Image (tube, rainbow, N blue to C red):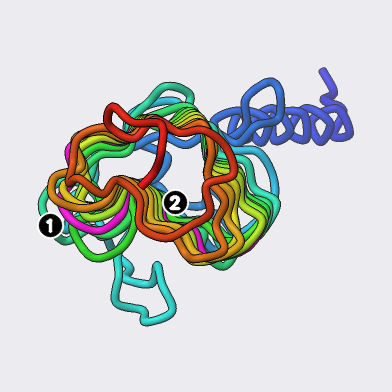
């Protein structure tokens, strides 16, 4: 019986194609999203240039999704290159703009005190991180560059250093996150103009609940408790419909050009509920607790309730 060499060649080629497809399926879901889990992180090559172990390095634009929890200790971090100093380890290092990372309900957990960042993308634009938990970062749970979005993240025990549990640059959207039980620094730290910070719940973190250095930001619908300062803005922003409770110091601290509307501030210790620049307008706020003078600075452009009086301060 003669064997057709061409048939053998085609068969071998088919086997190679099947093998390649099988390899690709371990990295890509059916919808083309690149999948990340502990096994794939330890193997490396999630994107070209990604070495085995941590950090997982994302070097290409695209959509990425966790398919399991990532648990990382100092021994697992093989490269300390997650910031310009080259001395900080992280779990996921995003080296490309235009990246979407869906945590898919899973958790990134950092064990011990040597892993400083959860997801690091501070110099990258148009990055989205959403839908999961970050626990145990020593500096920042998530940091992103301009025009980025962080949404539906549960952050715990982050920002021990003087940084932010969430850090972002201008044009950001930070929405519907729950940040709890940290120590020091800021819950949300933004440097840049035009951000929206909305619907976040921030409890028991440290010095400042929301810190913004920039103009044109909207800070609305947030619930902030147990910080030394609830909201602090260096710039001209609109701050509205927030609830600040049990602040150890000032409830809302805002610079000239800001507008302070319909916030509730109570139990602010011995400091002012509102500490405002001279050219800050405020109206429809409910201010209780704290010292006798609820408001320092600002221009009352509408009725407020200060303790039991509608005349402020």
* Residue pointed to by mark 2: 44
Q: Which contiguous range is marked in magenta?
A: 179-193
* Depth order, front residue of 53/7: 53
The residue depicted at 77 percent of the width and 27 percent of the height is 11
Assess disc 2: are there few (<14), some (14-19) or many (≥20) residues with their C-alpha within 10 Å of its C-alpha: some
In screen coordinates, is 99 left or right of 291?
right
Q: Quadrant of residue 263?
A: top left
Q: Is residue 147 visible?
A: yes
Q: Quadrant of residue 14?
A: top right
The residue depicted at 13 percent of the width and 50 percent of the height is 270
Direction bottom: furthest residue? 85
Vertical position of residue 57 compared to residue 131: above or below? below
The residue depicted at 53 percent of the width and 38 percent of the height is 283
Assess disc 1: are there few (<14), some (14-19) or many (≥20) residues with their C-alpha within 10 Å of its C-alpha: few
Label 2: state its secondary structure: loop
* Depth order, front residue of 231/311: 311
Vertical position of residue 1 compared to residue 164: above or below? above
Residue 113 is marked as 1
Going from N to C along the chain, the mark reached first, 2 or 1, is: 2
């Amino acid at each position: 019986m003669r064997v057709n060499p061409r048939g053998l060649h085609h068969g071998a080629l088919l086997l190679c194609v099947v093998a390649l497809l099988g390899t690709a399926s371990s990295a890509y879901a059916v919808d083309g999203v690149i999948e990340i889990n502990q096994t794939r992180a330890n193997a490396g090559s999630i994107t070209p240039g990604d070495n085995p172990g941590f950090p997982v390095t994302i070097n290409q634009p695209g959509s990425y999704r966790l398919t399991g929890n990532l648990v990382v200790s100092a021994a697992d971090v093989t490269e300390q290159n997650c910031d310009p100093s080259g001395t900080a380890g992280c779990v996921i290092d995003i080296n490309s703009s235009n990246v979407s990372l869906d945590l898919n309900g899973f958790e990134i957990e950092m064990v011990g005190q040597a892993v400083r960042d959860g997801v690091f993308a501070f110099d990258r634009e148009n990055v989205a991180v959403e839908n999961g938990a970050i626990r145990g970062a020593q500096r920042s749970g998530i940091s992103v560059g301009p025009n980025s979005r962080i949404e539906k993240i549960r952050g715990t025990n982050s920002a021990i250093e003087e940084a932010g549990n969430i850090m972002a640059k201008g044009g950001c959207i930070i929405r519907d996150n729950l940040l709890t039980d940290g120590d020091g620094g800021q819950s949300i730290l933004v440097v840049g103009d035009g951000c929206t910070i909305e619907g976040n719940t921030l409890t028991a973190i440290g010095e400042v609940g929301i810190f913004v250095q920039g103009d044109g930001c909207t800070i609305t619908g947030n619930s902030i408790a147990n910080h030394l300062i609830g909201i602090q803005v260096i710039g001209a922003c609109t701050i509205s419909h927030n609830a600040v409770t049990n602040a150890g110091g000032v409830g809302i601290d805002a610079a000239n050009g800001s507008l302070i509307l319909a916030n509730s501030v109570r139990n602010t210790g011995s400091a002012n509920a509102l500490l405002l620049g001279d050219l800050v307008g405020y109206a429809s706020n409910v201010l209780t607790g704290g010292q006798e003078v609820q408001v320092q600075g600002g221009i009352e452009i509408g009725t407020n309730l200060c303790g039991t009086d509608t005349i402020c301060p």
